[in-house]
Amino acid sequence: MNVLLDHLPQFREGFLGTLSITAASAALALVLGIVIAGFRVSPIPPLRAFGTAWVTLLRNTPLTLLFLIAFFVIPQIFFPGTSPFVLAMGALGCYTSSFVCEAVRSGINTVPLGQAEAARSLGMTFFQTLRLIVLPQATRSVIPPMSSIFIALTKNSAIAGAFSNTELFNVSKLLSDKGFAIGWIFLWIALCYLVITFAISGLFRLLESRLEVAR
């Protein structure tokens, strides 16, 4: 208990760091995932090919390798001086977007084809049909798998601690290096992760119940 009380500011800073990088990466993954899912079901072959390549490449690449590319290749070639937070958010967001894309695409496939055909017969474009007719109905099917994806994202954010970002894993490493009992450190870190993942799970359960009432 003493290790928590004596280093409460460090734990608080690590908790807020994990929360910040998880929220920013989730927002990026959500936007990219929906856009790429639109590409995957698009009638335009180059867009479908781009979406397929995005998902195949990112989903099958180890996340640690993406972090190494983000921190040691991207700043050297494209964006020198980019902050560690932005680089970590980019690696986590792009990696998670491939899973979000597949969850959204599976949700789109649950919408009857006749709905899209009726919208197109009324003169709507493909993207109008997707945005106004298909995606709102697909949302109900997408929410349960999305909860698991964002919980996994929270745990994956621990890798950012090894790349100059202040988050919970980084705090545990700093305290263990100072000789504090590793068991108690891991216990408090695990409790902090549980608070975040339970909050995500509760938020998605609330969304799911709200949409069930509206169905």
Image: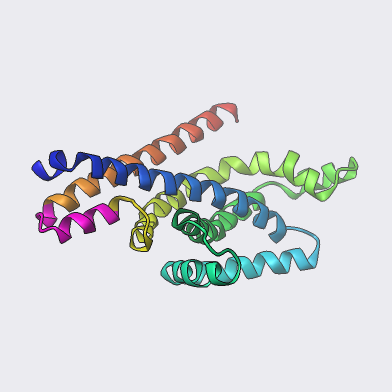
Whether residue 178 appears in magenta in the rendering, the answer is yes
Q: Quadrant of residue 135?
A: top right
Q: Nearer the viewer, residue 123 or 70?
A: 70
Q: Position of residue 188 (x, y in %)?
A: 19, 46
Q: How many marks?
A: 0
Residue lying farthest to the front in this orientation: 81
91 lies left or right of 10: right
Residue at 24 percent of width and 49 percent of height: 190
In percent of width and height, residue 128 lies at: 80, 43
Task: Answer left or right for 111 relative to 127.
Answer: left
Q: Is residue 5 above or below residue 26?
A: above
Instruction: Compare residues 11 and 206 and report the one nearer the observer.
Output: 11
Query: Measured from the top left, where is residue 202 in percent x and y?
Result: 39, 35
Which quarter of the rendered picture does the C terminus lie within?
A: top right
Establish if 50 lies above or below 30: below
Q: Is residue 144 above or below residue 87?
A: above
When the figure is inspected, residue 56 is found, relative to residue 140, above or below; the finding is below
Colour setting? rainbow
| Quarter of the N terminus within the rendering | top left
Main secondary-structure element of the magenta-colored stretch: helix
Q: Position of residue 122 (x, y in %)?
A: 89, 40
**Residue at left 40%, top 49%?**
151
State left or right for residue 56 relative to residue 41.
left
Question: Which residue is nearer to you in this view: 66 or 121?
Answer: 66
Extent of the magenta region: 169-183
Say which residue appears at 52% left-offset and 72% top-offset: 73
161 within the magenta span: no
Q: Going 31% across and 43% down the picture, which residue do you hit? A: 13
